[in-house]
Amino acid sequence: MKRIAIVGSGPTGIYTFFSILKNPIPVAITVYERAEEAGVGMPYADEDNSRLMLANIASIEIPPIFSRYLEWLKSQSPAHLARYGVQTDTLHERQFLPRILLGEYYRDQFLQLVDQAKRQGFEVTVNESCEVTDLKVTDAGVTLWAEGEAVAAPFDLAVIATGHVWPDDDTATRTYFPSPWSGLIEAKIDAGNIGIMGASLSAIDAAMAVVVQHGKFTETDDQPTQFTLDDASQALQITLLSRSGILPEADFYCPLPYEPLAIVTESALQREIAAGSDGLLDRVFALIVKELEHADPAWSAKIALHTLNADTFAKAWFADRHQHGPFHWAEANLQEVERNKRDKHTVPWRYTILRLHEPVEDIVPSLTDADRERFKHGLAKVFIDNYTAIPPQSIRRLLALREAGILSLHALGEDYTMTVKDNGTVISGQDGTYEFDTFIDARGQKSMKIKDLPFPSLRQQLETTGEDFPDVADDYTLLEPPCMRGRIAFGALPYLMHDRPFVQGLTVSAEIGENIASAVSKPADRCRRRLPFIEL
């Protein structure tokens, strides 16, 4: 039997396991998970989330394993769901629910995977509370060290599915948290002046982790969400800080799976790429304009789309939010998207941008250096804002905190300074200086390089290539150095972000897992395209 190691059992590890089971020839699979329970994943683990933290994906979008997420939810007891404020009779496929529940779903599916694998004749070993500390490729295969001890027999293939990489908890202090997952959930946060860097869902999650210690939300279907602050916590003030000082949109209704685009087709993009790098970004933007005008002529006329270019489009996209102020705009946007969801109405321009971001990503390798910078500061910001729309319930909670006089949002501008002190953090931006008793950096996942790998031997082997990032094939197995071909599959998203500017989500985890599984039976047919590094 081939011996396969899967390092990490979050979504990418689970979907890899699931896809390997589709191969007709049984293999021996060993799963390594440093957490106490395999199959949950850090973003959904009980110890890293509160029940107020919502998953930014609904059942209709989650790739199923043995059952769809909604089917699994309906099989749970009403009493269990009620612990998370979820009612069985209100469940539906487009609902955003607590992350912890999604973690329970993946844990259940993982356990079923183990049973199914054994029934199919696979050998399965699951090592929980067991951290892989090193990997090294040798002539005999992949040597792996777990908890500092070398595993006796080498593996034919090792899958690195370690997921998100956040700063170590030991870099956190009582007053500074380098990420929302650096001990924040377990920490006692005193009522005071709290600063949070960011205004995306990660920042909102950080705010929820704080306010749950100091008050209570009242949420009903027929009344606005309210927040009541505890009498002993009247000093609580939370400030969100971001470069732009705007809030994300609430998630909007649209048909799923995506309907095809009319103009920005794969063949149209390939023709533009074949025409050469010079002017490529502007030619593709002209196609985007035609697509938007075709889909929504009224909106296109309203923003004078025909007068915009790849550099000015982003300013027009965000203009309404800057003009009306973040909370006033958020309330109006919330009312709009909730009305549209009730009426099952799709806003054509939003839906068009949502469907554009993945195909347009394909042009990035062919852009000139100057146009890659233009893309980064223009269209990329629009695409990211669009596909990272957040659960409406999160917006309702933000508005409730604002109404309670607890929450504010400030724009720092592009240039700001941050000084972390023993007793607090000081931020200076375009509108002044802010001092915080407690500060949480919630800017999200950063792109990682080979030098950031936590496996010393593997890192040293990869550094001999002189490259900053892993070079992988279409099945995500390493191509360089040659000794690693077919031995290591790289499915850790932070190390792929340079290569895929919009890589994110569970659907990507499923796609990566399916491709990695093909490496078990045959080598990759071709190199996966490599994109130049873009720090978004």
Image (spheres, helix red, strand yellow):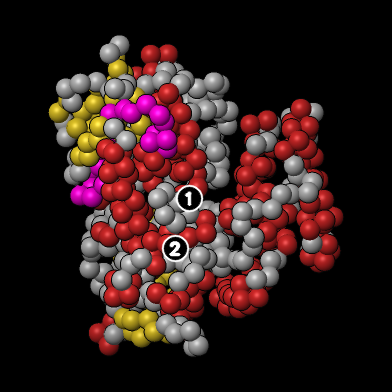
Relative horizontal placement of residue 405, taking residue 526 as reference (left or right): left
Query: Would you name the residue on which mark 2 appears?
Result: 70
Taking the view exactly as shown, the residue that stands out farthest to the top is 139
For residue 249, which quarter of the picture? Answer: bottom right
**Numbered mark located on residue 63 in the image:** 1
Report the amino acid beneath label 1.
Pro
Spot occupied by residue 25 in the image (x, y as percentages of width and height): 37, 26
**Which corner quadrant holds the C terminus?**
top right
Is residue 73 visible in the rendered structure shown here? yes
Spot occupied by residue 243 in the image (x, y as percentages of width and height): 53, 58
Callout 2–callout 1 Cβ contact below 8 Å: no
Q: Is residue 311 magenta?
A: no
Depth check: 534 or 523 in front?
A: 523
Depth check: 157 or 169 in front?
A: 157
Relative horizontal placement of residue 431, taking residue 293 as reference (left or right): left
Spot occupied by residue 92 in the image (x, y as percentages of width and height): 49, 69
Examine the rendered structure and indicate whether residue 238 appears above or below residue 379.
below
Q: Residues within 10 Å of mark 1 (few under 14, many from 20)?
A: some
| Main secondary structure of the magenta stretch | loop
Residue visible at 20% across and 21% down in the picture: 153
Q: Secondary structure at mark 2?
A: helix
Query: Magenta segment range?
Result: 19-38
Examine the rendered structure and indicate whether residue 280 appears above or below residue 385.
above
Q: Secondary structure at mark 1?
A: loop
Residue visible at 34% across and 24% down in the picture: 157
